[in-house]
Amino acid sequence: MRISKEPEERRNEILDTAELLFFTQGYSRTTINDILQRIGIAKGTFYYYFKSKEEVMDAVVMRFIDAGVAAAKEVASDHRFSVHEKLLRIIMAQKPDSEGKEQLIEQFHQAENAQLHQKSLTETILRLTPVLTEVIEQGIEEQLFHTAYPRETVEFLLVASQFLLDEGIFQWKPEEILRKIEAFIHIMETSLGAKQGSFAYVTQMFGQPPVADGKDERAGIKDGETEQ
């Protein structure tokens, strides 16, 4: 007997199942019939919610991005955190926190998913920019940063971090990655008018040890403050 479900519940069930199959057997090898059989629904039910497998993957990606943006907004509005704590927590909230999400990113790097990957990068930049701009503007008010272009600076920095430092696009050697991270931190501090060394913690975003400049990796945290 087929179980009737609320539209939003059924849509999420399709997304959850598709996401699992994309992760376990790959996007290109997963068919709509695989999704239907796993859930036990008719083709008509699937097409009521989605027009194609590509649209399902698109929805899976947007759900992933939505979760990261929601976490960023929560951090940005939390008055317990300093500006640098907010930036660090927002950055870390965008990193995959499960094997499934890492596999999703791996799917982006497949040649047939290039358009989808581009959309995910674009949407991440568009959605995160206003959240990060709010935090940078707080930093300007607190005299931590000095720039007349907070939003535009955020956009340039996001494009650089999302594209140039994407190891799935560029096959950088470890020493090249480290060099680019060091340069990225320098560019960030310079463009925001921040104190030198205050963004050393950004290395955590890329799974690298702190830049060896003799400064504490938590240099971005204000004196007298502790991490929550």
Image: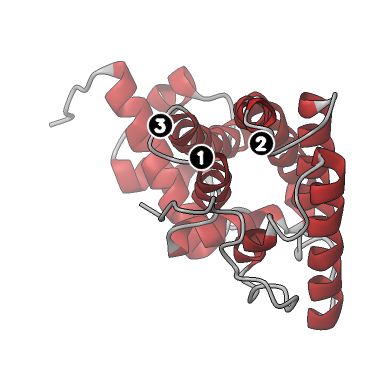
Q: Secondary structure at mark 2?
A: helix
Q: Is residue 18 above or below residue 97?
A: above
Report which quarter residue 99 is drawn in: bottom left
Residue kind at label 1, given as amino acid type: Gly
Q: Which residue is mark 3?
A: 78
In x, y percent, where is residue 114? 79, 48
| Residue situated in front as seen by the camera: 137 or 142 | 142
Q: Which mark is residue 68?
A: 1
Q: Is residue 153 above or below residue 202?
A: above
In x, y percent, where is residue 207? 61, 70
Q: Residues within 10 Å of mark 1 (few under 14, many from 20)?
A: many
Q: Residue at x 56, y 39 (%)?
A: 83
Q: Are marks 1 and 3 in contact (CB under 8 Å)?
A: no
Residue kind at label 3, given as amino acid type: Asp
Model colouring: secondary structure
Q: Is residue 81 above or below residue 169?
A: above
Q: Which residue is mark 2?
A: 124
Of the two numbered discs 2 and 3 on the same chain, state the one appearing first in sequence.
3
| Residue situated in front as seen by the camera: 91 or 150 | 150
Of the two numbered discs 1 and 2 on the same chain, state the one appearing first in sequence.
1
Mark pair 1, 3: CA separation: 16 Å
| Residue situated in front as seen by the camera: 17 or 60 | 60
| Residue situated in front as seen by the camera: 72 or 36 | 72
Q: Residue at x 46, y 21 (%)?
A: 49
| Left or right of residue 206: residue 68 | left
In x, y percent, where is residue 112? 76, 51
